[in-house]
Amino acid sequence: MAQKRITIAVDGYSSCGKSTLARDIAKALNYAYVDTGAMYRAVTYFALNNGLINGKQLDIETLIEELDELSIRFNFNPETGVSEILLNNENVEQEIRQMDVNDWVSQVAAVPEVRRKMVSLQQAMGKEKGIAMDGRDIGTTVFPDAELKLFMTADLDVRARRRRDEMEAKNMLVTMEEIKANLAHRDQEDMSRKESPLRKADDAIVLDNTNLNREQQLTFALEKASKFIAF
């Protein structure tokens, strides 16, 4: 049966496995995959490395001035089989996963000028369809006309355990208390920001993966996608 190429938007809370699911969907359908969270993390990493975050203060004005000088793109790594993010031609895939980036990414992402620049880049990446993109405003702002929209959620304790396991696998030791506090803070920041807040699109399908494994959530998503791609 012939298939048409569609846009698949995966939104939801931190550490719900959005990137894993979107990446698996893209692989299964031979689609492009874009981790929009990594893009905001890259901007945050830039701000940290260039002294734009000092103590508890973000120098928003200087960050805005520097935005036009930032180059953010993805490069496919054949060894890992995934696309890795490049900031000004430097691979920062590992650096953007650090806890200091976690602490500041929601605040950086809330800057309207930052979001507008990233949204513009994301829309350009997906203009030909055949793409699975995850983030927090993909189905509401970036691709409001996406054929399939998934909104992911999971129990906070489950999300915290997943984040801890992910960080420990990278030899980044952080306590569960720190992780839960960070996730709760990011949720609040994401939902309360004025520019493209985190919310479920009216036509999005909720996927609560608290008790689902990777294969089960992929099966769920592909079943939903099949209704749009077959003709």
Image (spheres, rainbow, N blue to C red):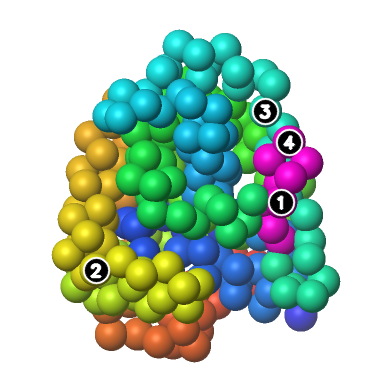
Marks 2 and 3, the one that precedes in the sequence: 3
Q: Is residue 171 left or right of residue 154?
A: right
Marks 2 and 1, the one that precedes in the sequence: 1
Q: Nearer the viewer, residue 161 or 17?
A: 161
Numbered tag placed on residue 109 in the rendering: none
**Residues tagged 1 and 3 counted as in contact (Cβ below 8 A):** no
Determine the residue positioned at 32% across, 50% down.
200
Measure the alpha-carbon separation of dots 2 and 1: 28 Å
Magenta: main secondary structure equals strand
Measure the alpha-carbon separation of dots 4 and 3: 6 Å
Magenta-drawn stretch contains 86: yes
Q: Is residue 227 left or right of residue 18?
A: right
**Residues tagged 2 and 1 counted as in contact (Cβ below 8 A):** no
Marks 4 and 3, the one that precedes in the sequence: 3
- Residue underneath mark 3: 70
- Above or below 207: residue 87: above
- Residue underneath mark 4: 88
As shown in the figure, which amino acid type bears the numbered disc 4? Asn
* Quarter that holds the C terminus: bottom right
- Residue underneath mark 2: 175
**Residues tagged 4 and 2 counted as in contact (Cβ below 8 A):** no
As shown in the figure, which amino acid type bears the numbered disc 1? Asn
Label 2, secondary structure: give it.
loop
Determine the residue positioned at 18% across, 55% down.
181
Label 1, secondary structure: give it.
strand
**Residues tagged 4 and 3 counted as in contact (Cβ below 8 A):** yes
Q: Which residues are magenta?
A: 83-91
Determine the residue positioned at 46% across, 55% down.
98
As shown in the figure, which amino acid type bears the numbered disc 3? Leu
- Residue underneath mark 1: 91
